[in-house]
Image: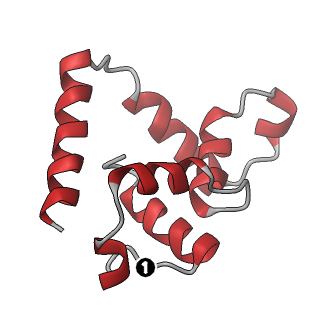
């Protein structure tokens, strides 16, 4: 989520017309935020990048642009590192703290 924060910001703005930096957003609960995040459509900036990252069809990959290959390769090389449950719990706790402070 940290690496994709800019994509989340732009996806909320384009999908819901909501700025994450607005006063209205600051009153949003964590549950509402995660529900909206889960409900982002396939045309949101976040979903488009996720589609590029997960593509495995060799025929589709042949037609990727240089930028699409860069996105996919960066993601694949980043995910070589394995994260522990403790790592993930720490990230979730940080996000919850940020929202609590809002």
Classify mark 1: helix, strand or loop: loop
How crowded is the residue under tag 1: few (<14 C-alpha within 10 Å), some, or many (20+)? some
Quadrant of the drawing holding the C terminus: bottom left
The residue at 47%/37% (across/down) is 75
Q: Which residue is mark 1?
A: 19
Horizontal relation, residue 68 to residue 96: left or right: right
Observer able to see residue 22 = no
Q: Position of residue 99 (x, y in %)?
A: 22, 59
Q: Residue at x 45, y 56 (%)?
A: 32
Closer-to-camera residue (99/94): 99
The residue at 26%/27% (across/down) is 88
Q: How many marks?
A: 1
On screen, 45 above or below 15?
Answer: above
Q: Does 44 sit above or below residue 30? A: below
Q: Is residue 20 above or below residue 97?
A: below
Say left or right for 84 vs 7. left
Residue 81 horizontal/vertical position (percent): 31, 20
Front residue of 64/28: it is 28
Which residue is outermost to the right? Answer: 59
Q: Residue visible at 23% across and 49% down?
A: 95
Which of the colour schemes (rainbow, by chain, secondary structure, one colour) is used?
Answer: secondary structure
Q: Position of residue 90 (x, y in %)?
A: 16, 32
Q: Is residue 18 above or below residue 34?
A: below
Please indicate whether residue 47 sits to the left or right of residue 75 in the image: right
Nearer to us in this view, 87 or 77: 87
Inspect this view and state whether residue 13 appears. yes
Query: Residue 18: where, in percent of width, then height?
Result: 49, 78
């Amino acid at each position: 989520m940290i690496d994709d924060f800019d994509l989340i910001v732009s996806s909320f703005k384009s999908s819901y017309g909501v700025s994450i930096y607005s006063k209205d957003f600051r009153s949003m609960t964590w549950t509402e935020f995660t529900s909206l995040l889960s409900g982002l459509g396939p045309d949101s900036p976040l979903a488009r990048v996720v589609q590029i990252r997960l593509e495995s069809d060799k025929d589709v990959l042949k037609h990727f642009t240089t930028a699409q290959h860069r996105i996919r390769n960066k993601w694949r090389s980043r995910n070589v590192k394995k994260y522990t449950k403790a790592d993930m719990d720490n990230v979730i706790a940080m996000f919850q703290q940020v929202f609590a402070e809002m």
